[in-house]
Image: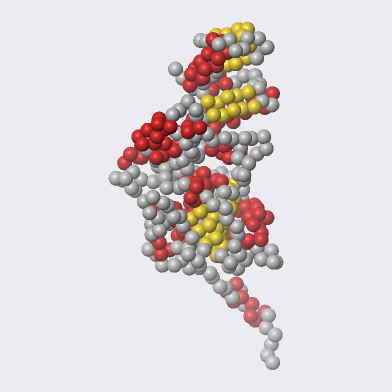
Amino acid sequence: MDLAEKEFRVAWKLIVERELIPVRRKSERELFMQLQNGTHIECRSEENPDQLIGEGLDLVVCAEAARLKHRTWDQYLRPALADRRGDALLTSTPRGFNWFFDFFNRGQKDHPEHEVGWESWQIPSSENPLLGEEEIEEARRTSTPEAFAQEWEAKFISYGGLVFPEFDQNIHVRSHIYNPSLRTALWIDPGTSAPYCVLLVQITPEEEVRVIDEIYLTQHTSDRIIAIAEDKWGGYILNDYRRPKAELEVIIDKAAAEAAATWRLRGYRAWGEKPTIKKGLEVHHQFLRDPLRSTPDSIVPRITYDPKCTNVIKEHGQYHYPDEIRKRIDTNPTELPVDVDNHGIDAVRYGYYNTFPALFNEDPKREEIEYMTYEDLDPGIRERVSLGEY
């Protein structure tokens, strides 16, 4: 019995068996009812997406929505609702930081991604009057902390196989305000078809990293990204003459030669190299959980993200190892994560390497600046511009 059939049986029991609403036609086998007022109720499964194509809909109820593919909503359900300006109710147990997590944020009035007309609620099992306290406590004792948090407390948590399971939104996400007295940098992972990620970062004297904001866009050139950054963060990265601040650091992999050159041509001190993925991930673990200050019961971070950094926050709940190596990752640590959902994390990795080289057992990075004289450009220029002898 698939989930659609289970949901239909609940409606059938209430409407047909208890006769709460008059019914004109019905078929339990076809998961179909037509009420006396002409309303149609049907249950369909995602297993055959073509079944979802049909006339406009007034209401869609998606059970266990977090298990659905995002394209099911985008390609089938959302267009059908648009035809009749219908509504949707999505219910689910969380499943990591996937698209359902994004939708939940749209319904939270204090979230940067909140949208008018959206509402969301988080209801733990403890508020279910049909569940006794003893049953909940037994589940707490017999379940892993992660499973209990997700299944019983309705919390969005990291799923198995994640590269950074220690990431916790309650710990690593904090509101930040730009402080002009702190060291400021842009940490960049350029892209075109993949997201072009720019992180606005500040570093405290204690070498703690505060990620204040992000730009995370696809199909944009470096020139366009720079214009967006200057418009968005002009007060933080530009001086009174609308030129890049001399003390601002722009960390970008020099292997991305065209992107790095564009930032330099626009007047920014753009430089940097990238570490190996393995070493970069090891350092990020140290920043997510400071080994010197954390305890077995509490995490003290050295890096935190403002809630505006929605994409790099989400990456921490998606960046994972391939399924086939999750069970042996501890015995074979050279295996690398899947190369998706990591553009913000890559920007952080580049930033670490060029800002804290000692953590990589390397000497401090130095900018390579070439100076040129007029003679380097044109050996004969001195004779042509000579003012003669005095």
Q: Give residue 60's position: percent from left, percent from top.
A: 60, 24
Question: Is residue 137 depicted above or below 312 in this figure?
Answer: above
Q: Quadrant of residue 361?
A: bottom left
Question: Is residue 247 depicted above or below 133 in this figure?
Answer: below
Question: Is residue 114 depicted above or below 306 in this figure?
Answer: above
Q: Residue at x 51, y 37 (%)?
A: 98
Quadrant where the N terminus sits is top left
Quadrant where the C terminus sits is bottom right
Q: Nearer the viewer, residue 96 or 315?
A: 96
Residue 213 seen anywhere in this rendered image of the structure: yes
Q: Give residue 352's position: percent from left, percent from top.
A: 46, 59
**Residue at the farthest top position:** 24
Q: Residue at x 61, y 75 (%)?
A: 374
Residue 160 seen anywhere in this rendered image of the structure: no
Q: Nearer the viewer, residue 153 or 47?
A: 153
Q: Give residue 307's position: percent from left, percent from top.
A: 57, 49
